[in-house]
Image: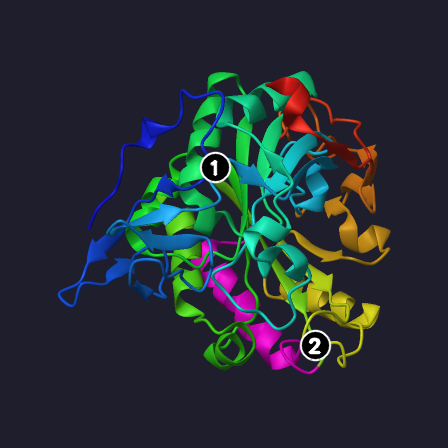
Amino acid sequence: MNFMNNSLFSRQDEVNVTGAPGRYWQRLADGRIQCDICPRACKLHNGQRGLCFVRMAQDDQIVLTTYGRSSGFCVDPIEKKPLNHFLPGTPILSFGTAGCNLACKFCQNWDISKSREWDTLADAAAPQTIARAAQQLGCRSVAYTYNDPVIFMEYAIDVAQACHEVGIRSVAVTAGYMCADPRREFYRYMDAANVDLKGFSEDFYEKLCAGQLQPVLETLLYLKQETSVWFEITTLLIPGWNDSEAELEAMTQWVVENLGTAVPMHFTAFHPDYKMRNVPHTPPATLSKARQIARKNGVRYAYTGNVHDKDGQSTYCHACGQRLIGRSWYVLSEWGLDENGRCRHCHTPCAGIFDPSPGNWGAKRQPVRLSGYR
């Protein structure tokens, strides 16, 4: 197995966007190159690309063809990731590249995740440029999102290192579908993550995602047991596929038994898209039921998403029931935490990473071009 030096690109302020040496691959006896970033283990001849399309066999090694290239940059509310317990109310500079290592039929970012990168990559930026832009824009963190940072891991790590040098934190928005060795390296540089637990059966992952459930569970267990990364979980509830009470019972029980009661869970509404346009929208009642099941099984912080539901989007003290953080979509209202992140009413700590007072970014979305920050 091969992996390149972490700092290979980290001191450049401009980048060569034709392809960067990748990490975690091996030469096979038949002459092919196997990519070891994710469980797919794509076996490639020179010139071939993996299912993600952005990792390619070239000159007898794996290269990342999207290093330094992005599908766009935008300042978002941190709650949009969604992260409700990580620096609430603050702005986060979000970007992605192209491609994905899963093939979800319900993908709601399919124009990015399933694109061929030259169709969508509209902006180029070196790691230091991104860090500088985040700092000057007043962002507390940078999110690797829109598509999965697993497949542009080398770029994301270099950006995270540059951001840490100026006090900017890093957030991975990911499906968690990766192998153990790259997982260990990747999360050394992440401060927070939202992991997309798409369903809770191997059948669901096989039929709708062309993937497997077990590697995702292993990522969640790794985050809990071996890192200090703050993480939350999101499940998009698709009518008739992963929204049964039995599956929600099993999922939430597994979370409590294996990850504890303090990991926030977000249940979000599906809308017809990509290859599942014949499936109806998720009824709000389904989301409320999922939240109810999660709380019954011991999940302290369960949320609804993609619908207007102030009760379901707000944070409550698990001890006394006081509303700690009021939310309407991405706008904060009540703030019931003291400067130490405890309930002002009963002084019980709320799990998360909080400032003494909340940010006030609100629901604003601000597209950014990075050419002015180089």
Q: Please, what secondary structure does the residue beneath circle 2 have?
A: loop
Q: Relative to the observer, which residue lies in front, 221 or 149?
A: 149
Q: Amino acid at mark 2?
A: Met
Q: Is residue 348 above or below residue 195?
A: above
Could you tell me residue 371's position as x and y percent? Answer: 65, 24
From this view, report whether residue 209 is shown above or below residue 138: below
Tell me the quarter of the image containing the C terminus.
top right
* Side of 145 relative to 216 (left or right): right
Looking at the rendered structure, the kind of residue marked 1 is: Val
Query: Measuring 69% from the left and 62% from the top, which residue is drawn there?
Result: 108
Query: Looking at the image, which is closer to me, 235 or 32?
Result: 32
Q: Quadrant of residue 33?
A: bottom left
| Nearer to me, 172 or 122 | 122
- Tell me which secondary structure the magenta stretch mostly adopts: helix
In this image, 252 relative to 21: left or right?
Answer: right
For the residue labelled by badge 1, is the local secondary structure a helix, a strand or a loop?
A: loop
Give the residue pinned by disc 2.
276
